[in-house]
Amino acid sequence: MRNTLRVVGLVVLILLLLLVAAFFIVRFYLAPNLDQWRPELQAWLHKEIHPGLHVDKFEISWHGMEPELVLLGTKILNQENQAEGSVEQINVQMNWMQSFSGRIQVQDLRLDQAQLIIYRDQQGYVRLADEAILYNPYQAKLEHNLPTSRELQEREAKFKAQLQQVFDYLPANVHLSRSQIVWRDEQRQSPELVLDEVQFDLTQGLSGLQLNASILPPENLAGPIQVQADLSRLGKGRAKIKLNHFYPQVLRHWLDLPVLISQGYMQEARLSIGYQQGSVADFDWQSKWLDFVIHEDQGEQALDIRADVLDVNIASNNGVSLPYEYSVAASNLGVISDEVFRHPLTFFGVQAKGRYTETAELQPRIEIDLLRARLPSGSLQAQGAWQVDSNSDNGLLDVDA
């Protein structure tokens, strides 16, 4: 028994000495001379990550007893050897306890002063450094209809299927600071969309994910955009998005969106989305518009709707499934519709609420529970519904006043 304990103690002592020796070798020999192996490290990056990844210098810094790999001057090159992305500094800290079990896992990833160029080529493929991310061809003509309930449910199911992969492959901590994202569209030949001051903090723990992010779009598009989110491993959580001075009509320069707004902007907007088991459980969208204008000129059927101040709220407790509850309020609302009214009309103190849903034929339908407004002489109170009708270009309106 005593001999057995002596042998076990000797083995433990030898292992400790080997660990100490390995630490001193890494700390005082490999770390200061790491850049000598840059060609070998560069070849490994080309093979395992991306063939266009180039690093100017490799270093190792220390946080107490833990080493951290530092990549300086990282560039992503395309086939023409042109830079389509760069990161001034990348800090990678490994989970050394996992490495002993044969699994290499990044514990902490920090990127500073990154610039990524994402573009859509002439064939409609969205790419980053020649790698196709998705296929999304430009459509010259777009329908103004919102996505159907079935389409939204399909997108939600796809997100739910990818949720576990996010937990499996993401490092415990990801931090992106002082960065820039550039969008180019070769197929549409639109101007560049530059997103500055991109900040991104993602933390993954036993309870789930926590995200804080902010983006500075072009001045003519919006003010700073802020995102906060938390999501448990069971798929429960909430995401919040905050917008200020947002001009959605400007998005038509870059994205394929059916935006009806001709003029005006959102002074502020808030979106809150709740999740249960990886599916959207509820959402609440609140927005305040200033100088709101919708204008469509179709010959003799011109339509012009204007409001100085417009509050629009849309919410659902059924996830992405219809119906959606809405409420609209405007201090004054001017309407010009040659087909409906003989003369321009101005409504004051407008209030409306109801729900957006679909017919049995999956056509949009807006139900009006209450419509209240003051006229220059008298007042109006009504309820009813509007829906798409195959026999009418403007749909079918049924109102009880």
Image: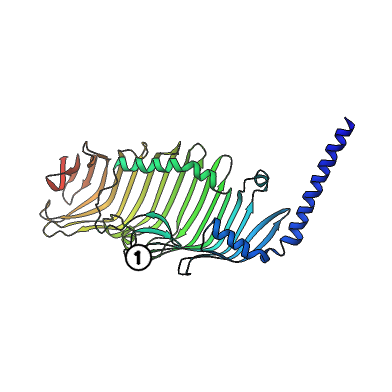
- The image shows residue 371 at horizontal and vertical percentages of 23, 42
Asked which quadrant contains residue 58, the reply is: bottom right
Of the pair 339 and 78, the residue shown nearer to us: 78
On the rendered structure, is 150 left or right of 169? left
The answer, for residue 34, to whether it is visible in the render is yes
Of the pair 351 and 89, the residue shown nearer to us: 89
Is residue 387 shown above or below 213? above
Helix, strand or loop at mark 1: loop
Of the pair 340 and 279, the residue shown nearer to us: 279
- The image shows residue 207 at horizontal and vertical percentages of 56, 39
* Quadrant including the C terminus: top left
* Quadrant including the N terminus: top right
Coloration of the structure image = rainbow
Give the residue type that dot 1 points to.
Glu
Residue extending farthest right: 2
On the rendered structure, is 62 left or right of 361? right
- The image shows residue 143 at horizontal and vertical percentages of 24, 52
On the rendered structure, is 185 left or right of 91? left
On the rendered structure, is 269 left or right of 170? left
- Report the residue at 64% width, 45% height from top: 102
The answer, for residue 381, to whether it is visible in the render is no
Residue where numbered disc 1 is placed? 186
- The image shows residue 38 at horizontal and vertical percentages of 63, 65
- Report the residue at 22% width, 38% height from top: 359
How crowded is the residue under tag 1: few (<14 C-alpha within 10 Å), some, or many (20+)? some
